[in-house]
Image (cartoon, rainbow, N blue to C red):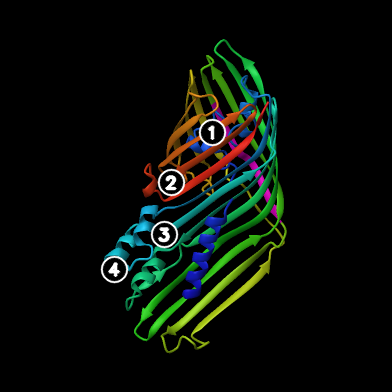
Amino acid sequence: MNSCKLFYTSVGLVLAMFASATGTGWDDARSIAMAGSYTAVARGYDAIAFNPANLGLQDKPGTQVQLFAFGSTLNNNSFSMSDYERYNGTYLSESDKREILSKIPSEGLKFRGNSAASALAFTFGPIAVSTTVEAAGTGTLSKDIVDLAFFGNKIGETISIDNADAEGLAHVDLNLAYGRRIKSYDWGDLSAGVNLKYIYGIASIDVSESNGSATTQVDGIDADGSILVRSATGGSGFGLDVGVAATYRKDWVFSAGLKNLVSSISWNKNAKETEYTFEVVSLTAETAGDDSTVVSDEVERSVGSFSTSLAPQVNLGAAYTIGKFLLASDLKFGLKDKAGVSTTPEISIGSEFHQFSFMPLRAGVSFGGVHGTSLGLGGGFALSSFYVDLAWASSGTLLPSFGRGLTLAISSGLRF
């Protein structure tokens, strides 16, 4: 059981902490500061991650050059920063252990990590080009394993690790987006857009099957289980994003985008399945060193190639501008629950204030989705054509010290 526990813990933590995002704007500091309320706000190359139809709006920028952008987020479903500060390095009493265990839901301790990096994106009127390095990771550790670590196994008690899993994906997207006004009305304009992307797969890992249990008998611990991992270190594919957007009486913008309407990545480099199995018979302190007590095996099989897809996601947004104040709201949800995307709807409200044109201030709140309740804060600095934006966001709370994760982002570029 110790080797199995170590494996699951390592996979979950590494994927969650290393991951780098799924093309939903994790590297856009302006979006993060507004808690993701950006679908109707994004312009230029920023629109690629939300809705390419925004490139066809009348207020689209002229020429833009992105210098760099980076964002990263890490969160879990159980513990906050205040929990870490409270328990880290201290002696844990039985009541402390039970309180920690009570914070983990029945589905287990889940980790998620996302981030993204891009540089030298360009906007030329209705056309935008960008290259983005993206990845996402999730990992789940069975609650029973934490229970075992804290309290041990009682005679006759069986623990299960069946719901432990992990998934990770890293890729580079080469995007070419175009938006065009397709109709003008008395009340405003209607535009449509499309983004075509070539996807270069860096790595894929997925725990496709896992099962196992351990039972404490009078004469020792009996356990068995298996883990099936599918992985690859290279591949390629394509993707398609589409959307529509409309303006209404100049002050309103409505935007609807569908990310990854079509996508496919064929993994053909080092594509394999690895099955880990273990069996423990009457394990005690005296028999721990006996090779016949703990038997494990690792079988690796080449699978030639396999295909995966990026999770489709719907982005709906509205934005209203009055004077120096911008108010925006979004509704997002994935059509599949995969690393970096959740089928749980996310609702957000964000704002931007331009009291000083060279120093915008931003804030927003969101509920649901990958992060649950979240608070976003940030600002920017602009000097002539140069700009830089910074952002921070909590995860799981509106109070930073009680959050179960955080997001940081920085982006910079030139507007001409």
Residue depicted at x 62% and y 38%: 261
Magenta residue check for 263: yes
Q: Which residue lies furthest to the front in this view?
A: 383
**Quadrant of image for the C terminus:** top right
Magenta residue check for 261: yes
Q: Residues within 10 Å of mark 3 (few under 14, many from 20)?
A: many
Q: Residue furthest top?
A: 186
Q: Is residue 176 above or below residue 306?
A: above
Position in image of residue 366 (x %, y %):
43, 38
- First to last magenta residue range: 255-267
Given the image, on which type of amino acid does mark 1 rest?
Answer: Gly
| 204 or 14: nearer the viewer | 14
Q: Mark 2 points at which residue?
A: 395
First of labels 3, 1 by sequence position: 3
Instruction: Give the foreground label among 1 and 4.
Output: 1
Given the image, on which type of amino acid does mark 3 rest?
Answer: Gly
Q: In this view, does 270 lie above or below 236?
A: below
Residue 17 seen in this snapshot: yes
Q: Mark 4 points at which residue?
A: 93
Q: Is residue 177 above or below residue 154?
A: above
Secondary structure at badge 1 equals strand
Residue depicted at x 59% and y 70%: 275
First of labels 3, 4 by sequence position: 4
Position in image of residue 265 (x %, y %):
68, 50
First of labels 2, 1 by sequence position: 1
Q: Is the magenta stretch mostly helix, strand or loop?
A: strand
First of labels 1, 4 by sequence position: 4
Q: Name the residue under label 1.
A: 380
